Image (cartoon, rainbow, N blue to C red):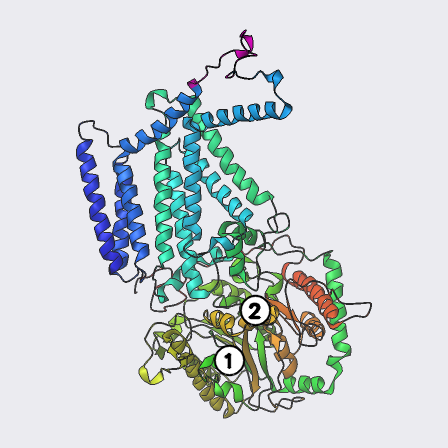
């Protein structure tokens, strides 16, 4: 409310100043700058609205500074003639400086040798003296040049670019002293070049560069909210999922931070400078075709130059601007939003493995598959399981539970939290353990991509969403595999089928049916989202109605962020005290996980009673967005790889309601990554494996887990993705050297399976609309249906 009160006062002051200046300039008939002044008043009105809607920060200083800046900008616009008079005074000083050309010819005077005030001849000066005189002359010329109209106009645009940069960075990146100076200089140059280009392209009008400044601030605010909700920055692949991204916005609470208001103040200053640069536009009488074409040429050169720079210069290898996949936020903070975004965009094209050859890759895959056949494939456990599978044809249910994770790994949350008890203590699982994932706080589709296809995001990057970018029509996957075995294949997600382009991807994968929100109209809901239990009931209905073997892939919705809805019933809400303090967001999340655990217990209990063989794979797609602050607060001075990897883990289990041949079913712990999970499940239950899966299992002996953050060697040691050689290894092959070799071979066969010759890698099937968060909203909109 304080922001609203201050903004009302600022708006009243701006309106008063505007009315006063309008009356003063009435006789002259000059109305220049009035539109800009009104624009700044509108910005103050927006600040008023933010205050009344509860979207303003609980801060005193930021609204005062914002409104002081906006009122000053409004007055400078309303009083354009006075502002311009000061600029003209500055330029006249340059003219006066240039007019001071009198210099007496002391060298020609007969009293030169005896005069104490003579101006020394050049030949009487030392070399340093002559250099000093020349430099002073150049400095004088520069001072004169800086007062010329064109130079003043360019300086205004340079300053406008600087403040636009601040408007972009400050909302989310509060400490620019942490940034690399050259990266910030590059970002300033790019923004300014675009603003100058648009300024001249639109014939020296200030509106176009001012709009660029507004876009910068808008991106900065979007970055702030995305970081707030996901603890991840905006990345290029997000642009390919705008439908989902826009729809996600419906489930969160938006509150500007103080830095958002500071960014708005910088935006206002940038817009004012752009408006003043526009005053230099020549009078109508001086405009001609030559000037028009010159402006177009300058504008085009600036914009084409920016385009050429962005497309032709390799930011990763040439400028060393990289995205740290294990901590992408740090990359954006240190290198600036635009340089890091460009570097990430340039890497969307899948990197080709070193010395890649399609024929050699195919040969490598067959070789690795042969090694599996000669080792694991010949064990009695595998052969017995194969025989059993061929006879039983068990139904396979894979549940990717939204944001399911065990946060007790964070020192029990300093609240005595022990995690989901049924899930952690199920005694007769076929396999269970830590699951290393390539998503954090969001990006569900990447976890399911890894599970269904066996491909690792490690070779594609953290800012890439294959579902929305790559052509997956011929990609090997579990749905296709089970369908070829005579299974009925069903995918379900109790939300809109357009999310993450699933409607197209699932069809390409070969799913016979995709059940979406329309199939759950009367289902049980929790916080307005279909509950886990409701999807399990739907699965049980399918099993009762069809005795044929089925493969069912269930992507749940219940636990989706945000977690400050306040919509959980009191009897389902836990009240943990974290370091003695209540955190409603954390408590809502932990309560949801308890509900998921309860629903899983009931579901497993019902599966036990079925008179048909069923295999269950249950895993979480990623952690919520908030554990990073506890990870940094409670785990200090530890190995960096272990510290970062903790955020990129969930848990999994593989369970069956029948005795699986060759398996003790004693909940054996086997920590692995999502890309191996589907293959390991197929291996354990005796299902047929393709050569790619056999090759993965061979590589897994040296590379047990891999994700975008890092990888593990056979000893369980964690390494970050950036570790690409064993600095301590000798002639003998160490576990790290074997992991590195396996990592290289995996990259080769994955590229072969995904992209083949690499000539046509991008999808032609785009998602139409989406609403990730609230199934009560129509796709692509925030309006209730």
Closer-to-camera residue (499/383): 499
Quadrant occupied by the N terminus:
bottom left
Kindly indicate the quadrant of the structure image that contains residue 563: bottom left
Secondary element at image label 1: helix
Secondary element at image label 2: helix
Instruction: Give the farthest residue toward the top.
Output: 110
Q: Nearer the viewer, mark 1 or mark 2?
A: 1
Residue 605 is covered by the magenta coloring: no
Residue ID at (74%, 76%): 372
Q: Which residues are magenta?
A: 99-117
Instruction: Give the farthest residue toward the front.
Output: 114
Q: Is residue 7 above or below residue 656?
A: above
Q: Which residue is mark 2?
A: 644
Q: Position of residue 441 (x, y in %)?
A: 47, 68
Task: Please say whether residue 200 is visible from this viewpoint.
Answer: no
Closer-to-camera residue (110/534): 110
Q: Position of residue 49 (x, y in %)?
A: 25, 56
Q: Which residue is mark 1?
A: 411
Q: Is residue 730 above or below residue 181?
A: below
């Amino acid at each position: 409310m304080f922001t609203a009160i201050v903004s009302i006062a600022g708006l009243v002051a701006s309106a008063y100043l505007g009315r006063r200046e309008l009356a003063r300039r009435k006789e002259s008939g000059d109305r220049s700058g009035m539109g800009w002044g009104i624009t700044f008043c509108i910005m103050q009105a927006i600040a008023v609205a933010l205050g009344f809607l509860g979207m303003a920060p609980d801060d005193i200083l930021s609204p005062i500074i914002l409104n002081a800046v906006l009122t000053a900008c409004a007055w400078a616009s309303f009083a354009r003639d006075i502002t311009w008079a000061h600029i003209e005074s500055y330029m006249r000083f340059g003219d006066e400086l240039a007019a001071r050309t009198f210099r007496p010819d002391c060298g020609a005077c007969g009293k030169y040798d005896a005069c104490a005030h003579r101006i020394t001849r050049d030949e009487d000066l030392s070399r340093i003296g002559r250099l000093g005189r020349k430099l002073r002359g150049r400095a004088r010329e520069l001072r004169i040049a800086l007062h010329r109209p064109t130079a003043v106009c360019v300086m205004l645009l340079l300053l406008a670019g600087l403040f636009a940069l601040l408007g972009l960075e400050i909302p989310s990146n509060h400490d620019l002293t942490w940034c690399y100076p050259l990266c910030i200089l590059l970002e300033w140059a790019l923004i300014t070049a675009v603003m100058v280009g648009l300024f001249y392209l639109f014939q020296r009008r200030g509106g176009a560069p001012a709009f660029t400044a507004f876009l910068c601030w808008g991106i900065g605010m979007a970055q702030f909210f995305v970081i707030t909700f996901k603890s991840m920055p905006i990345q290029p692949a997000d642009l390919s999922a705008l439908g989902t991204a826009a729809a996600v916005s419906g489930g969160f609470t938006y509150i500007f931070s103080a830095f958002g208001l500071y960014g708005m103040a910088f935006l206002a200053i940038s817009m004012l400078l752009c408006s003043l640069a526009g005053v230099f536009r020549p009078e109508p009488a001086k405009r001609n075709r030559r000037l028009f074409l010159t402006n177009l040429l300058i504008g085009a050169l600036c914009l084409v130059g920016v385009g050429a720079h962005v497309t032709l210069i390799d930011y990763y290898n040439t400028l060393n601007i990289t995205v740290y996949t294990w901590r992408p936020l740090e990359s954006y903070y240190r290198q600036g939003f635009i340089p890091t975004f460009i570097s990430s965009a340039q890497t969307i094209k899948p990197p080709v493995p070193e010395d890649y050859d399609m024929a050699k890759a195919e040969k490598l895959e067959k070789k690795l598959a042969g090694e599996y056949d000669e080792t694991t494939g010949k064990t009695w456990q595998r052969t017995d399981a194969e025989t059993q599978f061929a006879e039983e044809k068990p139904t396979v249910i894979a549940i990717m539970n939204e944001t399911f994770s065990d946060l007790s790994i964070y020192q029990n949350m300093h609240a005595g939290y022990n995690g989901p008890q049924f899930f952690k203590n199920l005694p007769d699982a076929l396999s269970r353990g830590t699951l290393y994932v390539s998503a954090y706080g969001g990006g569900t589709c990447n976890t399911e991509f890894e599970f269904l296809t066996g491909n690792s995001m490690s070779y594609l990057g953290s800012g890439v969403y294959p579902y929305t970018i790559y052509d997956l029509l011929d990609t090997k996957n579990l749905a296709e595999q089970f369908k070829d075995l005579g299974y009925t294949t069903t995918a379900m997600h109790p939300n809109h089928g357009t999310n993450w382009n699933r409607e197209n991807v699932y069809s390409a994968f070969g799913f016979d049916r995709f059940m979406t929100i329309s199939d759950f109209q009367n289902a049980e809901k929790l916080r307005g989202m279909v509950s886990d239990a409701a999807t399990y009931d739907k699965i049980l209905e399918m099993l009762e109605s069809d005795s044929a073997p089925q493969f069912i892939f269930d992507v749940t919705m219940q636990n989706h962020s945000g977690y400050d809805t306040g919509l959980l019933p009191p009897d389902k809400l836990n009240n943990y005290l974290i370091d003695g303090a209540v955190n409603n967001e954390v408590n809502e999340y932990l309560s949801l996980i308890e509900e998921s655990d309860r629903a899983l217990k009931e579901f497993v209990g019902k599966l036990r009673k079925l008179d048909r063989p069923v295999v269950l794979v249950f895993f979480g797609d990623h952690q919520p967005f908030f554990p990073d602050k506890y990870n940094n607060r409670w785990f200090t001075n530890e190995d960096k790889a272990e510290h970062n990897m903790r955020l990129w883990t969930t848990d999994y289990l593989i369970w069956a309601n029948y005795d699986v041949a060759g398996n003790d079913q004693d909940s054996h712990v086997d920590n692995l990554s999502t890309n191996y999970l589907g293959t390991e499940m197929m291996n354990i239950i005796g299902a047929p494996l393709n050569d790619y899966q056999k090759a993965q299992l061979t590589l897994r002996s040296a590379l047990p887990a891999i994700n975008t953050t890092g990888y593990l060697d056979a000893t369980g040691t964690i390494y970050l993705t950036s570790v690409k050689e064993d600095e301590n290894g000798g002639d003998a092959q160490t576990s790290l050297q074997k992991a590195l070799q396996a990592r290289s071979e995996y990259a080769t066969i994955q590229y072969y399976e995904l992209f083949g010759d690499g000539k046509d890698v991008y999808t032609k099937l785009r998602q139409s609309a989406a609403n990730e968060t609230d199934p009560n909203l129509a796709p692509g909109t925030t309006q209730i249906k």
